[in-house]
Amino acid sequence: MRVGIVVFPGSNCDRDLEVAFRAAGADVTMIWHKETSLPKGLDMIGVPGGFSFGDYLRCGAIAAQSPICRAVVDHAKAGGYVLGVCNGFQILTETGLLPGALLRNANLKYICKTIPLTVENTDSAYTSGYSQGEQVMFPIAHHDGNYTADADTVARLEGDGRVAFRYADNPNGSTADIAGIFSQNRRVLGMMPHPERAADAKHGGTDGQALFRAVVGAMQHA
């Protein structure tokens, strides 16, 4: 199973994502944002957290215009898997692969701590390793993690079972406590919390391991 991880100026979780995928058994390739095409044979693309382009203009807005993002969109539209974490989630909304937007936290403060999440839907390659309604602990580290979408979009996400994770104690004002959402085909997942920072006992928690093991396992058996 081959994963490509996109690196933008300002990415700071690309190596964490690489380590988590490798530990789950994936072969990982790093991809610079100026590339115009993806390496052949990739099963999945990771869009990491960080502060692409210094979060100037609007988080993820500049990165979404990078040459490689056109290839990432094409990969997803062809049925490929894409995981966006934190800034990666912001970039996926800016590319239009996921609906809604990530606005400034409701308390206008940067938040960095480990928080409880509820697994809302286990019917996906990403979440099949968890139990429905299971509570997991993932770190968050963001200033713009307030997930916002219009009422019709939220109703559609809820009705289609596309809410992947929900905050148990909403830290940033996100609509309906949403922490992560799937695309329509559930092959694109965007989430603000960091599973890659909870994938090794040395991190203080291992609740993220199930996500990486599940999606790598799904790819290996596809």
Image (cartoon, rainbow, N blue to C red):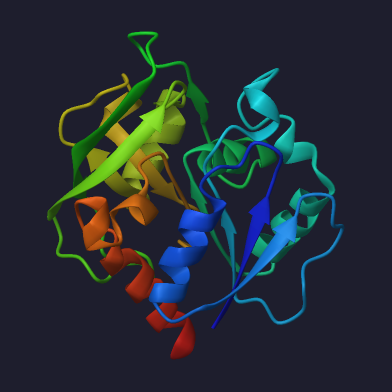
Kindly give the residue lying farthest to the bottom in the view shown: 221
**83 and 6: which is toward the camera:** 6
- From this view, report whether residue 187 is shown above or below residue 214: above
Say left or right for 9 vs 21. right
Q: Residue at x 55, y 44 (%)?
A: 88
- From this view, report whether residue 3 is shown above or below residue 27: above
Say left or right for 167 vs 81. left
Q: Residue at x 50, y 53 (%)?
A: 183
Q: Residue at x 41, y 41 (%)?
A: 156
Q: Residue at x 60, y 76 (%)?
A: 43
Give the image location of residue 3, x and y in percent.
Answer: 58, 72
Say left or right for 132 vs 39. left
Give the image location of residue 209, x and y in percent.
Answer: 29, 66
Q: Is residue 92 visible?
A: yes
Q: Quadrant of residue 75?
A: bottom right
- From this view, report whether residue 124 is shown above or below residue 144: below
Q: Is residue 187 visible?
A: no
- From this view, report whether residue 219 is shown above or below residue 21: below
**105 and 177: which is toward the camera:** 105
Give the image location of residue 177, x and y in percent.
Answer: 26, 31
Say left or right for 77 vs 3. right
Give the image location of residue 32, x and y in percent.
Answer: 76, 55
Kindly give the residue lying farthest to the top in the view shown: 108
| Quarter that holds the N terminus | bottom right
**72 and 195: which is toward the camera:** 195
Q: Quadrant of residue 147?
A: top left
